Image (cartoon, rainbow, N blue to C red):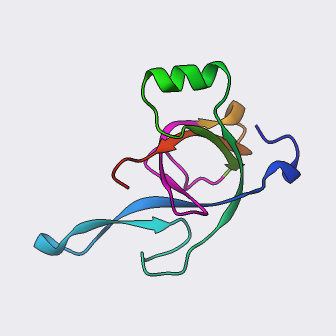
Amino acid sequence: MIKDPGEMTARIRIQAPVTIGTGINQHTAWVDLGNTSDTDPPRWTWAKWENVHGSEAWVAESVQATAPATVSVWYDSRVNRKCRVLDDAGTVYEVKSFDDIRKEHRQIEMKVQASVNG
């Protein structure tokens, strides 16, 4: 949970799957929220990024999670479980759990882990 905007020190991109083309040319592309095409320039947003630690790390390791983390951002209705997160190094993270904190539409907290196949 974000208690102070100064905690939001990580630049991330949030992408949603978009179906492009028709027929046999149809494919799914990942597009940054706010963009209309996968060729548009990246759209960065600020987030609070916390790598798992303590007992969470042991649980994550037991299920062989790769680079698990908790990512908190300001609420955006376009963000959902189907989205993925990219960090500033280009690592792709799958959203494993999604929470609109207290259903107040102010903050979103996502549990993510590095994707094996991007």
Does the magenta-highlighted stretch encompass residue 82? yes
Q: How many marks?
A: 0
On the picture, is 22 further left or further right than 52? left
Q: Which residue of the protein is positioned furthest toward the left in this rendering?
A: 24
Does the magenta-highlighted stretch encompass residue 114? no
Query: What's the residue at 42%, 75% (across, down)?
Result: 38
Could you say where residue 109 lies in the image, as x and y percent from the top left?
65, 40
Residue 43 appears in which quarter of the rendering? bottom right
Compared to 43, does 74 lie above or below? above
Which quarter shows the N terminus? top right
Query: What's the residue at 43%, 24% (across, down)?
Result: 63
Compared to 72, does 85 lie above or below? below
Query: Relative to the observer, which residue lies in front, 65 or 19?
Result: 65
Could you say where residue 112 lies in the image, as x and y percent from the top left?
53, 41
Could you say where residue 53 lies in the image, as x and y percent from the top left?
67, 28
Compared to 24, does 8 lie above or below? above
Q: Which residues are magenta?
A: 76-98
On the picture, is 116 further left or further right than 80? left
Which quarter shows the C terminus? bottom left
Query: Relative to the observer, which residue lies in front, 67 or 43?
Result: 67
Query: What's the residue at 46%, 76% (across, down)?
Result: 36
